[in-house]
Amino acid sequence: MGFLDLIIALSITSIVFLIAIILEVTKLQAQSKAFSKLNQETQEKLSSLRQKAESIEKLLENIE
């Protein structure tokens, strides 16, 4: 019976580790998606700021 108990214990441990890995991967995927969205929003804001800076630069050139 000892060998069978060992196999059962190892199987349960393997399943627990597999579930933990799956949960961690799922969490990392969610974080990756959130960071991707944040990066896209940041790029859009930078583009908008760049356009505004160019507009201000043109206005200053016209004043001179």
Image (cartoon, rainbow, N blue to C red):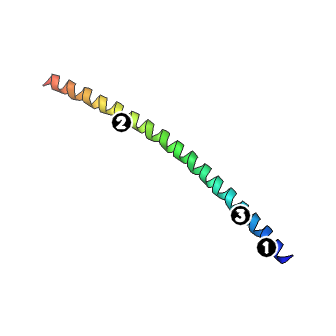
Looking at the image, which is closer to me, 33 or 59? 33
Residue lying farthest top? 62
Residue receiving disc 3 = 14
Instruction: Kindly identify the residue that appears in the image at 49 percent across and 44 percent down.
Output: 35
Q: Quadrant of the C terminus?
A: top left
Residue receiving disc 2 = 46
Residue lying farthest left? 64
Residue 55 screen position, x and y as percent: 26, 26
Mark number displayed over residue 19: none
Kindly check if marks 1 and 2 are in contact, taking CB atoms under 8 A apart as contact.
no
The three-letter code of the residue at mark 2 reads Leu
Q: Earlier in the sequence, mark 1 or mark 3?
A: 1
Residue receiving disc 1 = 6
In the rendered view, would you say 10 is above or below 35? below
Q: Quadrant of the N terminus?
A: bottom right
The three-letter code of the residue at mark 1 reads Leu
In the rendered view, would you say 58 is above or below 24? above
Instruction: Kindly identify the residue that appears in the image at 61 percent across and 49 percent down.
Output: 26
- Please identify the quarter of the rendering in which residue 19 is found: bottom right
- The kind of secondary structure element at disc 3 is helix
Residue lying farthest bottom? 2
Looking at the image, which is closer to me, 12 or 57? 12
Instruction: Kindly identify the residue that appears in the image at 33 percent across and 33 percent down.
Output: 49
The three-letter code of the residue at mark 3 reads Ser
